[in-house]
Image (cartoon, helix red, strand yellow):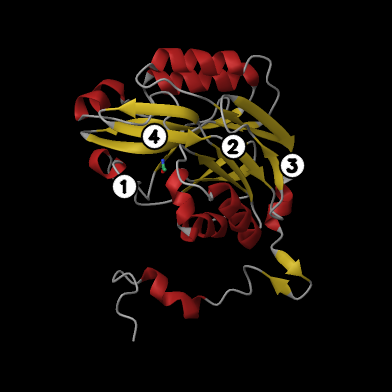
């Protein structure tokens, strides 16, 4: 399976231009599955709710879903992309998964970062999408900081973690090595690059999109700055084998009886 990332530098609020640029960058692409960054068509740093109202769309049903479906059909490619979703009167930082002729799957980001908490409602469940006959686990950016995200998706059967991102903190790329190693899954982190300076807020996004193998090897890394398209061949079937040694299967060796505190809603504060 040929999988990859498209690292972009979106311009805030310029949805049409951002979509056009993605179409240009994908001209002639040959891949089965490609991941685009978080909020790839809108940009990240919102300053008021009017901006959300102007830029958000329902998924499916809006121009960005239509764009993704057209690109998927044109290149016979499956896509995972971060989008600004409107559902009723609520906004979500979401990832959508599409493949040619398939239905659109939506994951709403569970772990919101900083000011995202002002704008978005957190999602309530992780999601697997079946793309090109492979189980793809959807997570978005800051979800990486919570090892439960990758673990839950892997236990749900994910073979590849698709991870649209707008990273600003260091260490994610190295953390994804561990996430892949401990779950024996592949990961595609599609990060954006560039800066946004809006309403007195400033964010510098770190690029270096990454494809990581189920053995924790960095198979490909994008540039720290600017756009980049990276594609590698992987065998996602390998992710179904959780054996580390002949005696150790990483999933069968788990001991959930010892992990109950993970689902304690007091967040582990009341440990005795
Ligand atoms: C992030 O979750 N966009 C840092």
Instruction: Report helix, strand or loop for mark 3.
Output: loop
Ligand 1 placement by image quarter? top left
Whole-number angstrom distance, CA of label 3 to CA of label 2: 19 Å
Ranked by sequence position, the earlier of labels 1 and 2 is: 1
Of residues 159 and 194, the one drawn nearer to the viewer in this rendering:
194
Q: Are marks 3 and 4 in contact (CB under 8 Å)?
A: no
Whole-number angstrom distance, CA of label 4 to CA of label 1: 21 Å
Instruction: Report helix, strand or loop for mark 1.
Output: loop
Q: Is residue 105 visible?
A: no
Whole-number angstrom distance, CA of label 2 to CA of label 4: 16 Å
Ranked by sequence position, the earlier of labels 2 and 4 is: 4
Ranked by sequence position, the earlier of labels 4 and 1 is: 1
Q: Residues within 10 Å of mark 3 (few under 14, many from 20)?
A: some
Instruction: Report helix, strand or loop for mark 2.
Output: loop
Tell me the residue that label 4 is attached to: 203
Whole-number angstrom distance, CA of label 3 to CA of label 4: 33 Å
Q: Residues within 10 Å of mark 2 (few under 14, many from 20)?
A: many
Of residues 163 and 59, the one drawn nearer to the viewer in this rendering:
163
**Above or below for 266 versus 150:** below
Mark 2 or 4: the one toward you: 4
Tell me the residue that label 2 is attached to: 208
The percent position of residue 54, horizontal first and vertical second, equals 26, 20
Q: Residues within 10 Å of mark 4 (few under 14, many from 20)?
A: some
Q: Is residue 200 left or right of residue 105?
A: left
Tell me the residue that label 1 is attached to: 122
User: On the rendered image, what quadrant is the N terminus found in?
Assistant: top right
Q: Is mark 2 within 8 Å of ligand 1?
A: no
Ranked by sequence position, the earlier of labels 3 and 4 is: 4
Whole-number angstrom distance, CA of label 1 to CA of label 2: 26 Å
Tell me the residue that label 3 is attached to: 234
Ranked by sequence position, the earlier of labels 3 and 2 is: 2
């Amino acid at each position: 399976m040929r999988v990859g990332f498209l690292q972009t530098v979106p311009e805030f609020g310029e949805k049409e231009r951002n979509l056009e640029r993605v179409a240009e960058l994908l001209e002639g692409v040959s891949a089965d599955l490609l991941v685009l960054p978080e909020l790839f068509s809108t940009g990240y740093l919102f300053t008021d709710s009017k901006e959300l109202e102007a830029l958000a769309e329902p998924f499916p049903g809006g121009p960005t879903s239509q764009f993704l479906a057209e690109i998927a059909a044109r290149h016979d490619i499956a896509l995972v992309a971060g989008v600004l979703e409107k559902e009723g009167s609520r906004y979500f930082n979401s990832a959508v998964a599409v493949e040619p002729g398939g239905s659109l799957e939506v994951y709403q980001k569970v772990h919101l970062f900083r000011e995202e908490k002002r704008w978005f409602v957190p999602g309530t469940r992780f999601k697997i999408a079946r793309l090109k006959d492979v189980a793809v686990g959807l997570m978005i950016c800051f979800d990486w900081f919570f090892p439960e995200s990758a673990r839950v998706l892997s236990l749900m059967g994910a073979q590849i973690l698709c991870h649209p991102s707008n990273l600003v903190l260091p260490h994610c790329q190295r953390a994804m090595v561990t996430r892949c190693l401990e779950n024996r899954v592949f990961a595609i982190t599609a990060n954006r690059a560039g800066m946004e300076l809006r309403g007195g807020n400033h964010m510098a996004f770190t690029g270096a999109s990454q494809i990581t193998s189920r053995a924790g090897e960095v198979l490909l890394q994008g540039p720290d700055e600017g756009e980049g398209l990276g594609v590698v061949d992987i065998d996602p079937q390998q992710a179904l084998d959780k054996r580390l040694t002949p005696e150790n299967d990483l999933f069968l060796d788990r001991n959930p009886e010892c992990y109950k505190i993970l689902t304690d809603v007091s967040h582990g504060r009341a440990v005795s």
